[in-house]
Amino acid sequence: MKFRSQYELGPEMMSFSQDQIKQEPMFFNCEVSYAYEAGGPITRNFINNLDSRYYHGILEMDRPILMNAAMVRAVLSGQKTQTRQPLRPFLSKVIWGDRLWVRETFAYVTCNPTDPGAFQGKDRGITSDHGEFFQVRYAADSQLIDWEPPTFKPSIHMPRWASRITLPLVSVRVERVQDISEADAIADGLRRADFGWTDGTTGYDTVSARDAFRELWDSIYGTWDANPWVWVAEWDKAEVAQG
């Protein structure tokens, strides 16, 4: 999460007086989360009083989100363009224009130095008896190496540089989980199967995408009947790094 410099903003900063700008201890690439929580070096007051026309695009927020293999495949296919999570305090800071980077189950596998996406393991603190160059592989792709089956790592441990999927948000809202419509459930990654609707893990015998979402939600959180408030984020198209 970086605050782009006053120099880069140029004429956009003309909405503030020179005295206002000088009074703010602005530093290039200052971390906004620190500034907001601690009150500096970019002050909480300065951030809170930014005009909304300048707020979007000035603050560049990249936030991680966990996705299982079925969700990742739905995102990559373009079918999944929404996600829902129980409402938590930190989610209230996520706004449209922010970007989610996807953490998924992954592995480092050795490769030739000329292979796509190859990197030197020593640069990342990664070693192997099979070689010094590595690629990132993803469980959602079922990419297996016969002579060195990958040891997959949980998605929570994926570093930012290893993530291949970024989701630029075009909409963020709060609603009750049961407010989800049939169209929303489909946009959340539910698809038609031979005997019902599914996300790839649950709901195969359901009669609608919404019913399949209900089963999926209860399999993860178990709170459908309580109808909790949820955070809903939406994007148009995923940005996928080619490696």
Image (cartoon, rainbow, N blue to C red):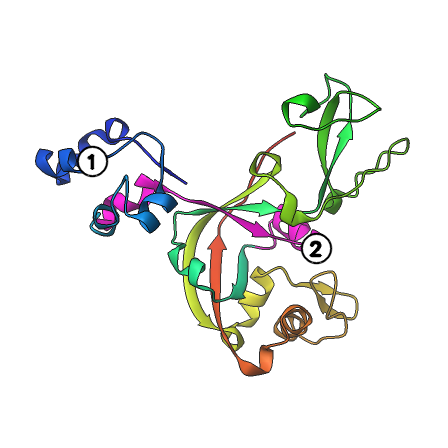
User: Helix or strand or loop: what does disc 2 sit on?
Assistant: helix
Q: Residue visible at 76% across and 74% down?
A: 205
Per the image, the residue denoted by label 2 is 70
Picture quadrant of residue 12: top left
In depth, the one of 118 and 129 nearer the eye is 129
Picture quadrant of residue 123: top right
In depth, the one of 143 and 50 nearer the eye is 50
The answer to whether residue 94 is seen in the rendering is yes
The answer to whether residue 119 is seen in the rendering is no
Q: Could you tell me residue 207's position as x and y percent? A: 70, 76
Image position of 98 (left or right of 163): left
Q: Residue visible at 53% across and 79% down?
A: 227
State the extent of the magenta-drawn residues as a range: 51-80
Q: Are marks 2 and 1 in contact (CB under 8 Å)?
A: no
Q: Earlier in the sequence, mark 2 or mark 1?
A: 1
User: Helix or strand or loop: what does disc 1 sit on?
Assistant: helix
Amino acid type at image mark 1: Glu
Quarter of the picture holding the N terminus: top left
| Residue 69: in magenta span | yes
Per the image, the residue denoted by label 1 is 12
Image position of 232 (left or right of 2): right
